[in-house]
Amino acid sequence: MTKKRSILVTGGTGYIGSHTAVELIEKGYDVVILDNLSNSHAEVIDSIEKITGVRPGFANIDLNNKSAVQEFLRIHPVEAIIHFAAFKAVGESVEKPLEYYRNNLVALINLVELCRDQGIRNFVFSSSCSVYGEPDYLPIDEAAPVKPAQSPYANTKKIGEDILRDASAVLNMNIVSLRYFNPVGAHASHQIGEYPLGTPLNLFPIVMQTAIGKRPGMKVFGQDYNTPDGSCIRDYIHVVDVARAHVVAIRRMLEGKCKNKYELFNLGTGTGLSVLEVIHAFEKSTGIKINYSCVDRRAGDVEKVYADTSYANSELGWKAEHSLEDMIRSAWAWEQELQKKTMVGSK
Ligand code: WQD
């Protein structure tokens, strides 16, 4: 029996982290999760075990506590780290910039220094298409210029990439940054999904909460953009496709197939959808009418962004496989699951 290769997933009880932990376990990796539960629930560990039959290792450690992380890694040596743990609310980052810079950047620097000191040679970074700002051309590829960030959150992703690029030049490490477009949907088991502690701000969960009656209605931010129906366009990608890209990146690193010490890839579908198209697709798929009103634009929104996926497709041999229908149906099933949870919780 060959020993399983151990991967640390920081932020592994979060949305993309938990889906990635499931995919890693199902591909035969040993997974340990560090999470301070600042925006997630410990019960996600039980859900990961329920889906896979394997319970990942877990410790409630804040990555800003470097000595605690160091001790954890001494006891649980790993061959690679996938780093999801970060604050990610765009609006909140504008109100609390120092907390965002400290939390997102100090944690990253701590982890890379520990990789250097403990001989961990593989690091995957959770980055974002928000580094492109308002793109100069579409679809947007990895060669596109990174733009001035529209928020402190986006800036922490931009600076994070710079830190990793410069660190990879002097450290004996392979580093891959994955620029997510808009991850949505949930695992087919309905056991895990987007489950933040606070009120979600993203489009998909808001559509679902409106449909289930948690919200009396929702707002469409802007109908005067230069798009076919006037609402913003994004590249929505199923969270399981995003998770699977992380497993591909880990395998690439462990098999020594990286072509550069620092690599970055777009994780999108290549298809842009407007806000109104998403709402109408949901209504068509479920037969449920969404009560929405069109209001002013939301500060910080880019008009349209969607990925050129050819580099990730060819270089990683990875392609998004889930349809919009899969995204909508899985997100809706998860919202109904969440309602059951809260009803059980309230009894
Ligand atoms: C999408 C569209 C809104 C809510 C997200 C993450 C960010 C990054 C990129 C990972 C916009 C509109 C939304 C609502 C609306 N991901 N909208 N009514 O802003 O693209 O950013 O993906 O790093 O962290 O936040 O996603 O879902 O907030 O908005 O009209 O109630 O939906 O204006 O056009 P966004 P979003």
Image: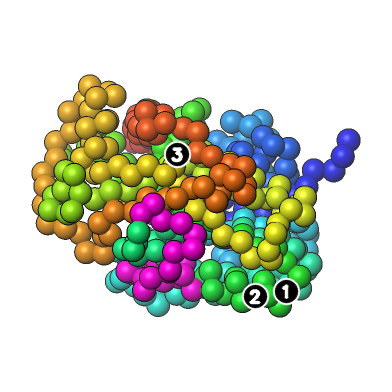
The amino acid sitting under disc 3 is His
Residue 321 locus on image (x, y percent): 50, 33
Classify mark 1: residues with Cα within 10 Å, few (<14), some (14-19) or many (20+): some
The amino acid sitting under disc 1 is Leu
- Residue 167 is labelled as 2
Residue nearer the viewer, 5 or 265: 265
- Residue 162 is labelled as none
- Residue 238 is labelled as 3
What residue sits 43% from the left and 69% below the top? 146
Q: Under 8 Å from ligand 1: the CB of mark 3?
A: no
Q: Secondary structure at mark 3?
A: strand
Residue 202 locus on image (x, y percent): 31, 49
- Residue 171 is labelled as 1
Q: Is tag 2's residue or tag 3's residue first in the polypeptide sequence?
A: 2
Disc 1 + disc 3, Cβ < 8 Å? no
> In this picture, is 292 found above or below 90?
above
**Residue 318 falls inside the magenta stretch:** no
State how far apart marks 1 and 2 are (Cα): 6 Å
Start and end of the magenta stretch?
A: 138-159
The amino acid sitting under disc 2 is Ala
